[in-house]
Amino acid sequence: MQPTQVPGFRAVPFTGVIYVMAEAARHGYRYGHPDWCNLGQGMPETGQLPGAPPRVGEVKIGLEDQEYAPVAGIPELRHAVATLYNELYRCDRASRYTERNVCICGGGRASLTRAVAALGEINLGHFLPDYTAYEELLDIFRMFTSIPILLDGSRGYDFSIEDLRREITGRGLSAILLSNPNNPTGKVLRDETLGRWVATARDLQCTLLLDEFYSHYVWGAGGGPVSAARHVEDVDRDPVVIFDGLTKNWRYPGWRCTWIVGPRTVIDAVSSTGSFLDGGGSKPLQRAAIPLLAPDVVRAESAAIRAAFLRKREILRSGLAATGMRFDLDPEGTFYCWADLSDLPASINDGMSFFKAAIKEKVICVPGEFFDINPGKRRSGRPSRFRGYVRFSFGPEEAQVAEGVRRIGELVARHRTG
């Protein structure tokens, strides 16, 4: 029986990874179950990596930390975040971030929600495909109009400066939301290209809302970390707002400790929206996060991530390719492979069919259609342009990734001969 809708509440659908995990649970999955390979997970492995700083095993809570934290975060952590960005990206810049340029939040979604709640009556551009959670986020606040911008897989999801200028001026965009590196495609804006994006935003006065949660997962030569902070000229005037936190780049997703970095006026605004949206993050965990932001600790953690995740990337990428899956581009960043299923047997060559078949093998993945961000379902009734894709994660431990690849290989082989 379908549950009865309670008066006054709308039906809120499960989307993206939430839907995937709910379906997996119906088939017997639970977190940590040894029989399952969760190649759908959006978090990195959280254990000790070779060469990484020791993992935090306990958090001391002082008497003064029993109180609420300030909505913008404790000053010591805000200062530590600003210092880290200056050290990593702004040593040669006269304009430096201070704690007034940082707001601490209780999770990535909380950070993004605070920011979009502070937007005015504007046109906000967002890309397709991109992070699944953006869909409800862009729908729930009605002040702004969200405008989709399609990225072309045949071009390796490249988007030129000329494309960017045309979209901003032609559609009258006042802000653009994007993940860099991109989730799910793994496309990375970096170096001179990223600098030109920041310069264009400055020139056309269009704010870049940059989700940099995967910015330490960069796989090319001289990889990671990357940040638009390197290319900002004036921290209080350039229209660049950055989102990051302990979730991915420090591999502490359960801490729900994140931050927003940007001009002071933006930080004041998101601190104000936080006062009625969430009230602020955990004070003990904010204090415990401060040592983790020491530049030497960050560099060591980033190097350990690169060594461990590059191996897993190759295991997943080569294993999927061996089954006949194709990639519009090899992942340049994140810990995902965005796989085109077009050459697989008809029974499993769309994302939802593959997901349903894989889950019977106790392998979890995420159908590509969930990354076709569609706020308000304005494009409902049309098949998703990404229905032939699946996102696979190499976030889990290496053995789980390898076993998942083995099962996928057997699954595809059965469908080819069946």
Image (cartoon, helix red, strand yellow):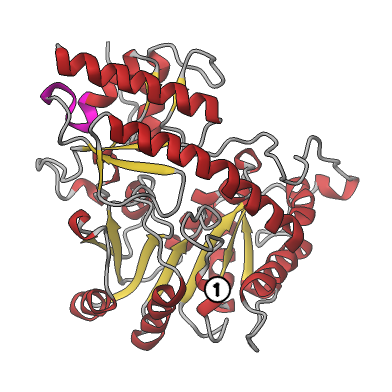
Q: Would you say residue 15 sits in the magenta stretch?
A: no
What is the magenta range?
A: 346-353
Q: In which quarter of the image is residue 354?
A: top left
Residue located at (18% from left, 78% from top)? 170
Callout 1: SS = helix
- Image x and y of residue 10, in percent: 31, 36
- Image x and y of residue 120, in percent: 37, 71
Q: Quadrant of residue 138?
A: bottom left
How many labels were placed on the picture?
Answer: 1
Q: Please state which amino acid type lies under the numbered disc 1.
A: Ala
- Image x and y of residue 322, in percent: 29, 31
Q: Would you say residue 351 sits in the magenta stretch?
A: yes
- Is residue 1 rendered to the left or right of residue 333? left
Q: State the residue lying farthest toward the right.
A: 63
Please say whether residue 13 is visible from this viewpoint: no
The answer to whether 75 is drawn above or below residue 287 in the figure is below
The answer to whether 165 is drawn above or below residue 227 in the figure is below
The answer to whether 285 is drawn above or below residue 270 in the figure is above
Camera-side residue: 11 or 312? 312
- Is residue 94 rendered to the left or right of residue 64? left
Residue located at (77% from left, 40% from top)? 56
Question: Dot 1 corresponds to which residue?
Answer: 229
Please say whether residue 404 is visible from this viewpoint: yes
Camera-side residue: 21 or 152? 152
- Image x and y of residue 202, in percent: 41, 84
The quarter in which the N terminus is drawn is: top left
Camera-side residue: 344 or 358? 344
Q: Main secondary structure of the magenta part?
A: helix
Residue located at (23% from left, 28% from top)? 352
The quarter in which the C terminus is drawn is: top left
- Is residue 79 rendered to the left or right of residue 403? right
- Is residue 333 rendered to the left or right of residue 291? left
